[in-house]
Amino acid sequence: MRYRFGEPTERYEEEFMTEQLDLAVRARAIEAVSLGDLLLQPSPINPEWIVDGEPEARMAEWSRSVDGTTTTNVWDCTAGRFRWFFAVDEIVHIMDGSVTVSSEDQPPRTLVAGDAALFRAGTWSEWHVPNYVRKHAILRQHLPSSILLALKFAGNVRAALRLAKGLGRKESVAPAPHRL
């Protein structure tokens, strides 16, 4: 897909939409799953991270974004206490059970079914699972700054093209006077 300054943009917008549709078709536009029905596979916790007990973890990835930066998973774990390093941003929603989490800058906080939390990339957290916990997690990798800059530039170009085409303006038009 290429944008050429000064040329009509309809063709390029159509190419963009076609590319997006192609990506969505390859990735299935809608993915739905019953989270309780996923078959979880063993996902051992690094033994060096375990502080207490013998926690056993399992997980299943059920979706991945087209660009590969985001995954959605279900994870569960039996009783134990362990440290965990978050290499990517992770948003968790507790589905069942409970866990008490803490970090160097956060006091312990117990999360129960229905609670959600964000764990930022590059941080350590301690997890204490008293009995069992099951979570739905969304993991997002950060893009390199060069790619973010390119995406921002592309967005600015699209906005400028839309404005030049008149799509960015909303003009109020007064109704024509009624004549007999």
Image (cartoon, grey):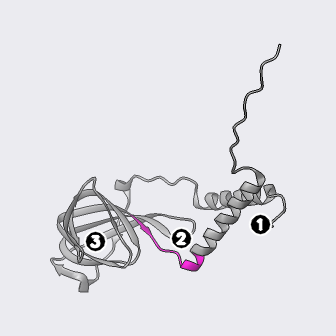
Please indicate whether residue 117 sits to the left or right of residue 78 in the image: right
Residue tagged 1: 3
Q: Is 160 or 174 nearer to us in this picture?
A: 174
Q: Is 41 or 33 nearer to us in this picture?
A: 33
SS class, disc 3: strand
Identify the disc placed on residue 68: 2
Closer mark to the observer between disc 2 and disc 1: 1
Magenta-colored span: 138-147
**Looking at the rendering, which quadrant does residue 40 occupy?**
bottom left
Image spot of residue 85 (x, y percent)? 32, 79
Identify the disc placed on residue 57: 3
Q: Residue at the location (25% across, 56% down)?
A: 96
Residue 6 lies, with reference to residue 103, above or below; the image says: above
Measure how far apart labels 2 and 1 are at the Cα level. 25 Å
Residue 125 lies, with reference to residue 113, above or below; the image says: below
Q: Residue at the location (83% across, 58% down)?
A: 8
